[in-house]
Image (spheres, helix red, strand yellow):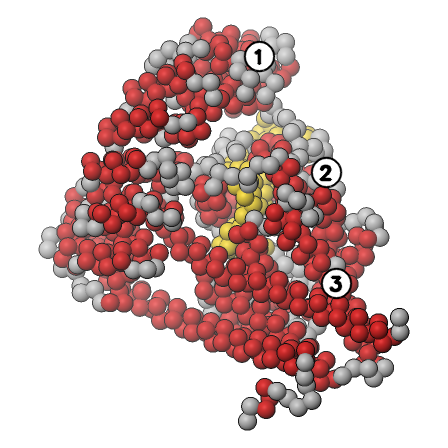
Amino acid sequence: MTLQDVVITGQWVFFAYFVGINLGYLTQNVIAISGMRRYLQTADYNEAEGAFASLDLPISIVMPAYNESASIITACKAMLQLEYPEFEVVVVNDGSKDNTLDLLIDAFDLQRFPEAYRARVPCKPVNGVYESPRVPNLRVVDKVNGGSKADASNAGINVCRYPIVCVVDADSVLQPDSLRRVIRPFLEDRNTVAVGGTVRIANGCTIRHGFLEKVGLPTNLLALFQVVEYLRAFLFGRLGWSPINGLLIISGAFGVFHKETLIEAGGYNPDAVGEDMELVLRLHRLMKSKRRPYRITFVPDPVCWTDAPTKYGDLKGQRVRWQHGLGQALMLNRSLIFNPRGGAVSWLAIPFYLVFELFGPIIEIAGFLFLVICAWNGWLAWPEASIFLALAIGLGVLLSTSAIMLEELSFHMYPRTRDLLLLYFIAIIENFGFRQLTALWRFQGLVRWLSGRKHTWQTITRSADIAGEEPGN
Amino acid sequence: MLDFLSPAGIEGLALTAWHTTLVAGLTTVVLFIYTLGLRAATVIERRRSSDIEARWRDVLSRAAMGEPNVVPPRIRRYERTLVLELWNAFRNLVEGPAAESLIQLAEFAGIERIATRKLDRHRLTSKLLGAQTLGFLHSNARWGDLVKLLDDENTALSATAAAALARIDPDNAIKPVMSRLTQRRDWPRNNLSKTLALLGSERIREPFAHVLSDSDDDTQAWLLDFAPLLAPDVYDDIATERLRESTDPRVLAGALKLVTGRLDVPRLPWLVAHDVPFVRIQAAGALGRIGAPEHVPLLTRLLADEEWWVRYRAAQALVTLPFLGPNALRRLRDTQEDPYAGDMLAHAMAEADLA
């Protein structure tokens, strides 16, 4: 094979990848727009007619906490104030080294309780369960540190009393009516086993007493990029997969599960780097192997707000971890790939994730190097190359614009017009550096997974006291 | 002038790419303008809505409070949807004389006419609003159309039509609604409960029992959840009959949930030892509600069940028995041979503050 053959073949590989990924995203976009339209048509009606609340399924909220002394009390109080007829909050103190447990004991007059604990999903030993005589729907599980959120979540799941389990991050800020919104799919379809909700970026918003008071945009550029990224990921990424039951991720910051199915699947995998995605894939695998009808679905309402990393190192660490987790989750559930009984998950979603999300960074980085090499050697037809570059940027901006339009069409959470204009500006400039950077980080994550290196947990610097009193930045 | 559409020297795939770029760029601009237009429309709509709301909230509040001769403002075309939504929201909150006043106000304001027009619209939200308003108005102007909507493929619309019919004329709504009870398993449980409650326990008594007896096990198990909407003596009979005859665990569990202790439970020892855990769970709960001293040995046996939830429900039932005081419970706890049984009773006692 001559060098010319390599260049020509390379061109076609990159071109096929480019066409495939953009067609995929555009299709998701179209499905999401139609799904959103349908959803909005009945959402208000469901709210109005949902007055007979006694049939709402009770929910257990599991909130794992490790060294969360700065925010645990506010977060806990906020959870307890959610608007829902019947729910309990199970806080899991995962062997915190700080005074998280002491603070909880003081704030809620917790008393050690002879809980008849049963370990239905594996986790590290539980030291004790605490109850509050003042707040009957709060329990705190104190356990030996398991080194992962998954292990702490499993301990919480073991203690849950109710048929539906909602797992949230201790630093998540929930909308007061979030439970009411995410329970709807369980009421509408009894085959629903898991529901995810839209997670938004809390940086720049005003949070008081653990609740969102005012929506705003952050001033930090990295956080701003993530605002647009999250809009894209949730408003058409997930909404696009949901109608065909092809959802592969439910964010770890807020996920709701049918408890018995979750336990049947074995709970969270403590060894998984991306435990949230791994669990959803395992649920798909379980239901398909048992040949049971099921739905894993997504509600587009913004139900949860989370703190985004604002420092280069933190963001890089997060993205490397996500990519590593993606590879591991797909590998652990590889029997789903092209499974004859797998439906949209096996034949559409996983192949798409495999080619464009997991191995995509290889093509993207290689494409960039290819471009540089060709330019260096004078092999590049500049007019044509510029056109393809413009097309890549144009389609990127189009997808972001479409996500912003969906947000304005549905929830219009950003009240100031200048916020909207800023989002458009970000949608354009993210194509010049940020996207390439994330491709590089994803590539590093992929290499880390392929090389079998063990993932080490990092502490991400909080940019905003999102569970406290002050506005975040 | 349009040379940029086919630049010189560019051909084949690159030309297609160039055209796609132009289309993407143009679409982006259109979406951008559309979004800004949406924003502008939202801002105008919000301002307008707050004016309408302020005006109508006052009128609706005065009418609901019973103020006589409240004159409603004229409803302009662009105000119709919001006024209907507001009127429905108020109407949903009140019953009795206040509801009558609101209906009277609606007559003056011509709300019925607007609602019937909404029902004819193509948009789902308009149809929903129309059906809901006609229901709250007790207007049978479009009875036939609402009955037709019961079979609409859209769940929300058909369930709203059912609720509207039940509000308008419960006597005549019984037949069309109850005949669709088993066909429309897609109706959300909350909505169906509300509709059945609107129809009234006396009215649904017979058709419900009829539907139940004609249904398969799966449907029976589903229907039993709604049985508490019936009069207690009716669901006592329903429960007893199912417990005597059924072999389906879901039906048995559903019937056990209805047990209140007014009647004897047939086949009790068999139910307590049933293979399926959720039947034993419900049996333990039923024994607690019956509260008979002779059932203490059965509950004590369930306390050592292999299933956590069965043990928990048995312990809860034991703790609620009025004739077992704290000392008797402590003795029972301390004499359990099975450590799980003792732990569970200690747990339930601590929950009841009896530890």
Query: Which type of secondary structure does the marked residue at label 2 adopt?
Result: loop
| Residue visible at 71% across and 30% down in the picture | A125
Task: Compute the Cα span from label 3 to label 2.
Answer: 35 Å
Q: Neighbour class for label 3 at 10 Å: few (<14), some, many (≥20)?
A: many
| Residue visible at 60% across and 80% down in the picture | B19
State the image quarter where residue B73 is shown.
bottom left
Which of A416/A360 is in front?
A360
- Most extreme residue toward the bottom is B1
Q: Neighbour class for label 1 at 10 Å: few (<14), some, many (≥20)?
A: many
Q: Looking at the rendering, in which quadrant would you find the C terminus of chain B? A: top right
Dot 3 or dot 2: first in sequence order is 2
Left or right: residue A430 versus residue B183 is right
Residue A43 percent location from the top left of the image: 41, 52
Q: Are marks 3 and 2 on the same chain?
A: yes
Q: Amino acid at mark 1?
A: Arg
Examine the rendered structure and indicate whether residue A430 appears above or below residue A337.
Answer: below
- Residue wearing tag 2: A145
- Residue wearing tag 3: A361
Residue B47 percent location from the top left of the image: 33, 68
Query: Which type of secondary structure does the marked residue at label 3 adopt?
Result: helix
State the image quarter where residue B266 is shown.
top left
Instruction: Tell which subunit mark 3 falls on.
Output: A
Task: Compute the Cα span from label 3 to label 1.
Answer: 62 Å
Task: Compute the Cα span from label 2 to label 1.
Answer: 32 Å
Query: Is any part of residue B64 visible from this angle?
Result: no
Residue A260 percent location from the top left of the image: 58, 33
Left or right: residue B167 versus residue A237 is left
Left or right: residue A150 versus residue B154 is right
The label on residue B76 is: none
- Residue wearing tag 1: B333
